Amino acid sequence: MVEVTSTKPQADREAKRRCYARGGIPLHLLIDRDDSSVTLFSDPERDDYRQLLTIPYGKPLPLPEPFAFDLETGDFG
């Protein structure tokens, strides 16, 4: 699941993330326009993700299997 923050970024960061975890979506990538960052949530358990990795725009984000490549974020800003 890939999502870009909307006009209600707090809902994207919290409520939607928890819904995706409850639904068992294994990876959730949130591109946060307000914070100029990218967060990869992984390892869902109940109503949240157990792991997250946040990086600022401009740095590569390593994506796990089945993707297994570094996502370049330099053009996100």
Image (spheres, helix red, strand yellow):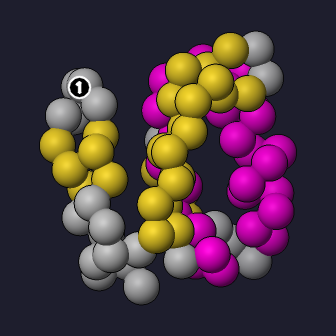
Quadrant for the C terminus, please: bottom left
Q: Is residue 10 magenta?
A: yes
Q: Using the rendered view, name the quadrant where residue 17 is placed.
A: top right
On the rendered structure, is 44 left or right of 55? right
Name, please, the residue furthest toward the left: 69
Mark 1 crowdedness (10 Å alpha carbons): few <14, some 14-19, many ≥20: few
Q: Residue at x 41, y 74 (%)?
A: 57
Decide if residue 71 is in sight here: yes
- Please state which of residues 19 and 53 is positioned toward the viewer in this rendering: 53
Q: Is residue 62 magenta?
A: no
Decide if residue 23 is in sight here: no
Q: Residue at x 29, y 81 (%)?
A: 75
Q: Residue at x 52, y 29 (%)?
A: 42
The answer to whether 53 is drawn above or below residue 42 in the figure is below
The answer to whether 35 is drawn above or below residue 49 in the figure is below
On the rendered structure, is 25 left or right of 14? left
The spot of residue 46 in percent (x, y) is 76, 14
Name, please, the residue furthest toward the bottom: 77
Name, please, the residue furthest toward the top: 46
The stretch of residues the image draws in magenta is: 8-35
The spot of residue 26 in percent (x, y) is 49, 24
Which amino acid does the dot numbered 1 rest on?
A: Pro
Residue corresponding to mark 1: 66
